[in-house]
Image (spheres, rainbow, N blue to C red):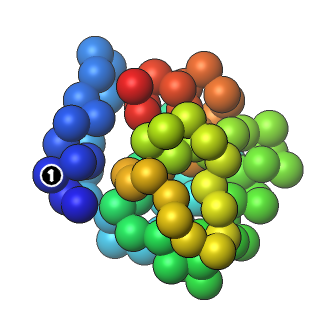
């Protein structure tokens, strides 16, 4: 799965390791980070953060350009981003 994250390289994207999913989502919602990407789909790690980003006007997309599904079966990795255009750029 981490190899899939390496495929998300795009101009202007600076990958870095994730220490805490919750803090990554907070950074996107606050606007201090444009997007974050994850290679695992445990709903308990993502539900609150995805809601926070969505309520702040952001978007989340899986590799197949669908919203993250909490029940699983997502095309990984997926991203949460400040807006849909940024999310699409990350998963393209």
Q: Residue furthest front?
A: 73
Which residue is identified by label 1?
A: 3
Q: Is residue 77 above or below residue 81?
A: below
Residue 8 image point, x, y percent: 28, 35
Q: Quadrant of residue 44?
A: bottom right
Q: Is residue 54 left or right of residue 38?
A: right
- Along the viewing direction, whichever of 79 and 1 lies nearer the viewer: 1
Q: Is residue 38 left or right of residue 88?
A: left
Q: Is residue 14 above or below residue 46?
A: above
Residue 84 image point, x, y percent: 66, 28
Q: Quadrant of residue 40?
A: bottom left
- Along the viewing direction, whichever of 54 and 1 lies nearer the viewer: 1
Q: Is residue 69 above or below residue 60?
A: below
Q: Residue furthest bottom?
A: 44
Task: Determine whether the residue tagged by mark 1 lies in a helix, strand or loop.
Answer: helix
Residue at x 21% of width, y 36% of height:
7
Q: Is residue 2 left or right of residue 75?
A: left
Q: Is residue 26 above or below residue 9?
A: below
Inspect this view and state whether residue 54 appears.
yes
Q: Residue furthest top?
A: 11
- Along the viewing direction, whichever of 47 and 70 lies nearer the viewer: 70
Q: How many marks?
A: 1
Residue 58 image point, x, y percent: 71, 39
Residue at x 34% of width, y 71% of height:
19
């Amino acid at each position: 799965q981490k190899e899939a994250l390496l495929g998300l390289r795009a101009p202007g994207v600076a990958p870095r390791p994730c220490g805490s999913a919750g803090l990554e989502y907070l950074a996107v919602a606050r606007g201090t980070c444009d997007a974050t990407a994850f290679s695992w789909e445990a709903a308990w790690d993502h539900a609150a953060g995805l809601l926070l980003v969505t309520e702040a006007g952001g978007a989340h997309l899986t590799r197949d350009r669908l919203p993250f599904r909490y029940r699983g079966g997502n095309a990984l990795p997926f991203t949460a981003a400040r807006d849909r255009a940024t999310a699409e750029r990350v998963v393209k």
